[in-house]
Image (tube, rainbow, N blue to C red):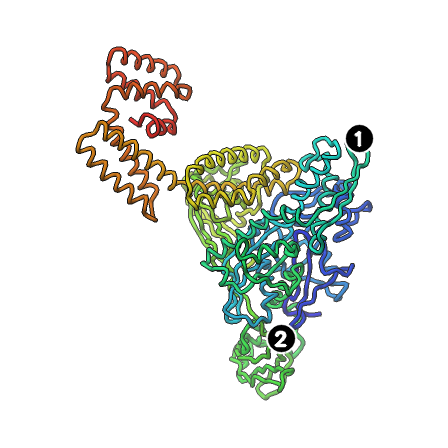
Amino acid sequence: MKRDTADFGIDLGTTNSAIGVLRGMDVEIIKNNEDFDYTPSVVHIDKSKSMIVGRAAKEKLDKDEKNTYAEFKLQMGTDAEFNFERSGRRMRPEELSAEVLKSLKADVKKRLGEDLHSAVITVPAAFELPQCEATNRAAQLAGITFSPLLQEPVAAALAHGFQSESDRVFWLVYDFGGGTFDAAVMQVRDGMIQVVNHGGDNHLGGKLIDWAIVKEIFIPAILQEHRLTDFRHGNPRWSRAIAKLKQAAEEAKIRLSNSESAEILEEFPDDDGELIEFEYTLRRSELEKLAEPFILRSINICRQVLAERRLGTSSVEKVLLVGGPTKIPYLRERLSDPRNGLGIPLEITLDPMTVVARGAAIFAGTQRIDNQEASVPLVAGQYAIELEYQPTGPDPEPLVGGQVMPQNGESLSGYSIEFVNAEARPPWRSGKVSLTPDGYFDATLWAEKGRKNNFQIELLDKTGRKLESRPDNFSYTIAVGLGETLLIQSIGVAKANNEVQWYFEKGATLPLRKRFEFKTVDDLHKGLQGESIKIPVVEGEHKKADRNPLIGYLEILSADIKRDVPAGTTVEITIELDKSRLVKAHAYIDILDQEFEKVIEMKKPTPDAVVLQQEVEEEKQRLERIKDKVASTADSKVLNVLETIENEKMLEEVESTLDAAQVDRDAADKCQNRLLSLKAAVDKLEEAMEIPSLVAEANQITDWTRQIVEQYGQQADQRKFEILERELNNMIQSNSTNPTELSRKIDQMDALRMKLLTARPDWWVGFLAELEEHRASMTNPALAEQLFSQGMRSVSNNDVEGLKSACRQLLQLLPTQEQKQLGRYGAGVI
């Protein structure tokens, strides 16, 4: 069957995948060979080395885990490889995804008899650039040569809005999939759907609930009855048993959507090879408790994307549910709760398992493909027409333009073209539209709503004789259109000072193109192996570069340059992003007059389990230090951030995934991702703590200074104190307090106190004793010993200046932070 538009839409999911085709005004979900609407995204290589995809493969997950893989979508864009032990074959995530796509193609061939070469493929909106690149490669490997990428929330909105009468409203797409979460605010206005904001998490999905069931319920229950050595997810010895439990958890979770309890019965060998039976009744209440932190995370993301657009929940007409986990009754209850959830009506008319494939097919109907007849020579007397039009749109009177290609340089003056909507009642004709001598034309059509309008093309010569044309027809459907495609996360380069130079901002309209310049830091020597100009690329919104995911590098290799490039050389980099968020980049070095293509490599780096362990421990200690300070403040902003960290169980999740990071690449990625979130949250906590901490410090310093002024000050000191106190109080009461200005004013108050104290010889004696308590921290122990001896002699000899000199030098031997602490909270900075 010849198609002018892609028409097929594919939801390439973490857990399941589906394909739909647009037929006029409806979408048909193509069933697989088992008559199901969706196919498990699982690949197995059997004993005959044959590739098996789908449900039959999924049944092997807990029986032949070394030759069966699932959830590889989460590794898209990484260098991960999956080793099929029996065959010795190693496959990358995009290769496994290609096998799923081939399976869907085979279903189309069986059901419709068509060879599929064009299809829209959906990706999570939170997918990073390397993951989009990998998805495109998977399509190419599967033989899908035309494969525009569409964000999953956009697809869901299109499925709900294709023939919707809603207008001037906002929708919130809540897409809780097997391994990813997206929240997108969509605006429906004047027949167009537009993404206005987005938030998401590539490591938040239903599989986290499955793992929570395994780790927090199944494993403890098993260990109560059986002695199993180091029985945990992170121990490869128990990988098969853990795989069985993970599969059982997923199946039980699904059953609990329709019942109050689910029975689990599994068996596996113990330490001695003897089979043990695990029998457990999982109750819905247990599932709800475990799912709560993940649901809360998703709700917090939804609240954030609404707040960023200054939208209240009352401004949103409905929430569109996407993904299998949204069938969980408790999840729907939480979302509907106006106090603890979103309190927005839920839209449940479409199956959340196939709604994305439906929307992808609708979008595919707008994606024109190259006319495959173009390569076929024209027959005598036949004219080629190049058409410019949109296959769908909200306008009942759409425009069409184009060119009839002249033959052998002839003039088409006096020729005309007419468009006929024969199925309209009554039949509609555009009337004859004159061609320019070069064959150009434009016309206004008329279409009926509620059906696919097919327009016949009638080409006439000067005498009114009909001519044969190719194409001789095209179609148009009145339907909601898709607005501009927006960039959902900012993209920038990480600088040496841990700042980010953003060059594409979140919310910018795709496609994008930008050129920028930078200076090389080091010399680059021609042909010297291992040398390159390398710039890290990050994607996210955080001010600190290392809080954003690293998604690849801009790199110019020494092997590719004509001659040496000295440090300080200007390099121009041009970056392009298309509507599918696929990246192109090239560089130009002026002193070489040389251009470099393909200088960008989009690939997520492999997490280092040892480094993760160190960073987790450091972050844990940082969080504990801040929590100690939180106890001294009742600031609501501080308490809210801390509550989010604790309610979402950020630290617990990081530590849990860290345990499995050595044996599970996905767990390592998830640990790294969640660790970044924890770091950013603690940063936010520190920022929120800054003003309350400074206020507490200001009050303490003011009280100390008041006592010293009353005890030792003169009238001028009293007046200065009163002025400083008034200025500090004004700053504290201001809603726009600047931390830098407040800190400077505190220093001025402290300086008044120290001026009065350091004028007294007895203070220096006490300061020497205070310094003695910090002797262990001093950087030069030998010099410290000499200075302490000098100080004691000065005290004995009543030598105040000698004592001052010893104390000042001793203070300089301490780390900067301890110097400050001694100054403010102990003796004072000299």
Q: Earlier in the sequence, mark 2 or mark 1?
A: 1
Task: Identify the disc placed on residue 474.
Answer: 2
Looking at the image, which residue is at 19% across and 36% down?
Answer: 719
Crowd tier of the residue under label 1, counting other residues whose Cα lies within 10 Å: few below 14, some 14–19, many 20 or above: few
Kind of residue at badge 1: Asp
Q: Compared with residue 497, is residue 182 higher up or lower down, i.e. above or below?
A: below
Q: Compared with residue 594, is residue 241 higher up or lower down, i.e. above or below?
A: above
Choose between 528 and 719: the one closer to the eye: 719
Residue 565, image x and y in percent? 45, 40
Q: Quadrant of the C terminus?
A: top left
Would you say residue 562 is visible in this rendering?
no
Q: Quadrant of residue 822?
A: top left
Kind of residue at badge 2: Phe
Instruction: Find the distance from the CA under tag 2 to the CA under tag 1.
Output: 70 Å
Q: Secondary structure at mark 2?
A: strand
Looking at the image, which residue is at 69% across and 45% down?
Answer: 91
Residue at the outermost left position: 715
Looking at the image, which residue is at 69% across and 67% down?
Answer: 28
- Residue under numbered circle 1: 272
Classify residue 616 as left or right of residue 310.
right
Q: Secondary structure at mark 1?
A: loop
Residues under numbered marks 2 and 1 in contact, where contact means CB atoms less than 8 Å apart = no
Residue 395, image x and y in percent? 53, 75
Q: Compared with residue 18, is residue 809 higher up or lower down, i.e. above or below?
A: above
Q: Quadrant of residue 146?
A: bottom right
Choose between 437 and 116: the one closer to the eye: 116
